[in-house]
Image: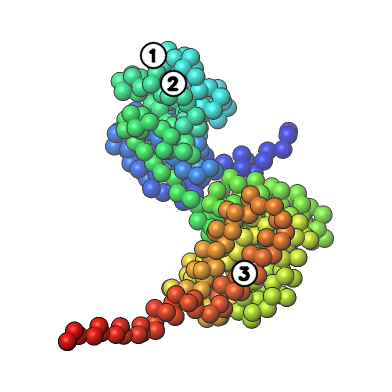
Amino acid sequence: MSYQVIARKYRPAKFSDITAQEHVTRTIQNSLRMGRVGHGYIFSGLRGVGKTTAARIFAKALNCQRLTDDPDYLLQVTEPCGKCESCRDFEAGTSLNISEFDAASNNSVDDIRALRENVRYGPQKGKYRVYIIDEVHMLSIAAFNAFLKTLEEPPPHAIFIFATTELHKIPATISSRCQRFNFKRIPLDAIQKQLQSICDAEHIVVEGDALQLVGRKAQGSMRDAQSILDQVIAFSAENDHDGAISYQGVAELLNYIDDDTMFDVTDAVAAQNPVKMLDVAQFVIKNGYDEQDFLEKLIEHLRNFLVVQNLSSTKLIERPDAVRERYQRDAGNFSPRGVMQMADFLLLTQKELKFQFEYQFRFELALLKLIDLVHAPLSSSTSTATTPSPQKKKPLSST
């Protein structure tokens, strides 16, 4: 049997398995218990947060025979049983009541017309025919218009579930006829917990800080985190300790610049040390790190200083405890105004650096300018504003 990637092997099969989307699963389960199932749903949100997975579980639950026949199971459990004929057909990919479409490759008017013709026919088994349309924002305007009448007056057996990463591209005439659910970005601790359970199931030894780094790289997407974990497992297979995954190994694979380098930048600013700042720039360039990525992480680094300065706490900083303590300690080296000036400058530099020649020099110059930003004397306009202006001479009175 061929290898199955982690994202598919550990794909949720029940509502309770979906991570960090309780506001969606709770509403859907309540609608099943109350028999208040709508005809159109839009699931929107970041890639890899569970939109299509939730749609598939919802579709499976709608035709689950046990949920239909057992009122107690419906009220108390409200999960697809996975054992009835309908659930087994779905798992085997042979269910005729659940259809999935990729709007990215089936986005023409003719495709929607074919779907409309298919919608007229009722289910062979169960109560509903469910149509899951992924990346629905890729449909053309003409295709949306062709679909409008069907969505406005659908057959009683038809349910449409649309999944999209770009809700703003769906016409208001479509979205207003559907129930909309916004899937949240998955918190780092939830991603780390899920990855740890996967490693435990796969009997893989892993450092907690390593999984946190994977989660940070995924930026709120569970699927991205699981894909990265697949890479990390393969990279660490030759380790001496039975393929144990270490923080250093993950950082090496992901070409990740660690927090120490970011602190080197702010230390150089605080100490007004241009030599140390140029050493950091050379480290980034010689090791082949992407300068844009470095500036992005440096902006996040400054954001963490602002969090400490404004909250007097590190609870919103997603880092190991030792790094949090360093943020707490070093935050006093700068004023909030100075940190904001550096962040504003880096945001501007990040945009301009894409279109400039002499890339290395401009990158070095940007880092050196951080020192000048924080320690430059007050501008002349500021000093003038604080200095009292000389009194004007009164005109001589005429005699």
Residue at (49% x, 19% y) in the render? 108
Residue under pointer 2: 143
Classify 340 as above or below 3.
Answer: below
As shown in the figure, which amino acid type bears the numbered disc 1? Arg
Which of the 4 quarters of the picture holds residue 293?
bottom right
Residue at (47% x, 26% y) in the render? 139
Tell which tag, 3 or 2, sits nearer the viewer: 3
Residue under pointer 1: 120
- List the single residue furthest toward the left: 399
Residue at (36% x, 29% y) in the render? 174
In this rendering, does residue 207 appear at all? no
Q: Marks 3 and 1, Cα distance to the nearest angstrom?
A: 67 Å
Q: Quadrant of the C terminus?
A: bottom left
- In depth, the one of 336 and 212 nearer the eye is 336
As shown in the figure, which amino acid type bears the numbered disc 3? Lys
Classify 89 as above or below 25.
Answer: above
- List the single residue furthest toward the front: 399
CB under 8 Å between discs 1 and 2: no
CB under 8 Å between discs 3 and 1: no
Q: Can you tell which mark lies on residue 186?
A: none
Residue under pointer 3: 369
Across and down, in percent, residue 227 comes to 65, 46
Tell which tag, 1 or 2, sits nearer the viewer: 2
Across and down, in percent, residue 115 comes to 45, 17
Q: Marks 1 and 2, Cα distance to the nearest angstrom?
A: 18 Å
Classify 238 as above or below 262.
Answer: above
Q: Earlier in the sequence, mark 3 or mark 1?
A: 1
